[in-house]
């Protein structure tokens, strides 16, 4: 199955699952759904194809340059090349997710990066499809920074494809309109009760917590976990009422941020400075 086919199957599954135990008992239609349908198709299919076509020759050129400079052996360690697939998958998941935890943290704390990440945090009604609402530049940032790590690890293409499908499934789950936790497993794997507090509005809770993408482990290790026993009353960020609600408006909005970047702490949660790490309490996962 292609990635697009996996995305379609996972999306259909979560459309049904959300009807079983919804956190917010609303109808299937909600404001912004049309916007998210665009992001689902564009980010889930077309953007991946475009980036693959663009990155393949760039990656080949980088590899050729490393070889020509005699640096291939130094930078291309390929530590997992001879490992079984399951071991490659586990290490790739841990390494990539920890790296993405750090990048996600920067997206909130660096004003120029926050202008792009605000698109994702413009979600005011959380459900599975919101996991695909993000500015295309975010993917470029993540992929361009992650490629050197993947080149060092040397995981097979099949393993990386499996990791992409698994991360998509967990991303749908994290954002789903579900009142579901994972018990003790929630200290390792991200889940709806945890991730919704990452999207909390400053009026409803402390910002800058729960940066985990697939794994919640890093937030518990680094003291950024915050999981109260109830969902927040409001999502998004200060100024959401004036934020564009159309695709062109959201894609062009970051350009104004590069000219006059707002405070990352203010926009991401209302405080004039980043919330001290670990100031939020960690309760049930």
Image (tube, helix red, strand yellow):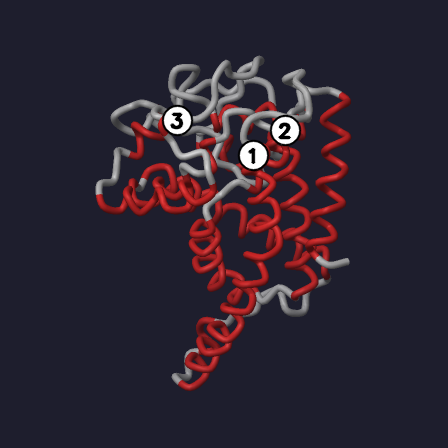
Q: CA distance from mark 3 to mark 2?
A: 30 Å
> Mark 1 sits on what residue?
216
Residue in the picture at 50% in, 14% down: 233
Residue at 51% x, 16% y is 232
Give the left or right position of residue 186, taking residue 114 as reference.
right
Q: CA distance from mark 2 to mark 1?
A: 7 Å
Quarter of the image with the C terminus is top right
Q: Please give the label number shown on residue 240.
A: 3
- Taking depth in this image into account, of 87 and 208 the one nearest to the observer is 208
- Mark 3 neighbour class, 10 Å CA radius: few under 14, some 14 to 19, many 20 or more: some
Q: Position of residue 272 (x, y in %)?
A: 25, 25
Q: Label 3, label 1: how many angstroms apart (C-alpha)?
A: 27 Å
Which of the labelled discs sits on residue 92, or is there none? none
N-terminal of the pair, mark 3 or mark 2, is 2
Residue 23 sits above or below residue 168 on the image: above
Between 108 and 33, the one lying in front of the other is 33
Q: Are marks 2 and 1 in contact (CB under 8 Å)?
A: yes
The image position of residue 279, as x and y in percent, is 38, 21
Residue 231: image x %, image y %?
A: 56, 16
How packed mark 2 is, by other alpha carbons closer than 10 Å (few <14, some 14-19, many 20 or more), is: some
Residue position marked by numbered label 2 in the rendering: 186
Left or right for 77, reference 255? right
- The reply to whether residue 234 is in sight is yes
Give the structural element (helix, strand or loop) at label 1. loop
> In the picture, which quadrant includes the N terminus?
bottom right
Pointer 2 or 1: first along the chain: 2
Residue at 49% over, 23% down: 226
């Amino acid at each position: 199955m292609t990635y697009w086919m996996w995305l379609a199957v996972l999306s259909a599954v979560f459309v049904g699952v959300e009807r079983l135990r919804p956190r917010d008992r609303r109808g299937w239609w909600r404001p912004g759904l049309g916007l998210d349908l665009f992001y689902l198709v564009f980010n889930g299919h077309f953007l991946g194809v475009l980036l693959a076509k663009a990155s393949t020759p760039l990656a080949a050129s980088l590899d050729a340059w490393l070889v020509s400079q005699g640096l291939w052996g130094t930078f291309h360690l390929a530590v997992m090349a001879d490992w079984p697939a399951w071991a490659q998958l586990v290490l790739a998941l841990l390494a990539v997710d920890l790296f993405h935890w750090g990048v996600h943290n920067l997206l909130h704390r660096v004003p120029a990066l926050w202008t792009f990440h605000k698109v994702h945090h413009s979600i005011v009604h959380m459900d599975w499809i919101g996991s695909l609402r993000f500015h295309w530049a975010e993917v470029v940032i993540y992929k361009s920074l992650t490629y050197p790590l993947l080149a060092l690890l040397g995981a097979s293409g099949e393993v990386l494809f499996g990791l992409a499908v698994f991360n998509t499934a967990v991303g749908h789950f994290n954002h789903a309109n579900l009142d579901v936790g994972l018990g003790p497993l929630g200290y390792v794997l991200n889940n709806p009760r945890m991730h919704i507090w990452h999207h909390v509005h400053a009026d409803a809770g402390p910002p800058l917590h729960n940066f985990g993408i697939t794994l919640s482990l890093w937030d518990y290790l680094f003291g950024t976990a915050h999981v109260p026993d109830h969902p927040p009353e409001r999502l998004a960020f200060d100024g959401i009422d004036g934020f564009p609600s159309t695709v062109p408006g959201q894609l062009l909005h970051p350009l104004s941020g590069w000219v006059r970047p707002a405070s990352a702490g203010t926009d991401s949660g209302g405080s004039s400075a980043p919330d001290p790490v670990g100031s939020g309490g960690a309760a049930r996962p």
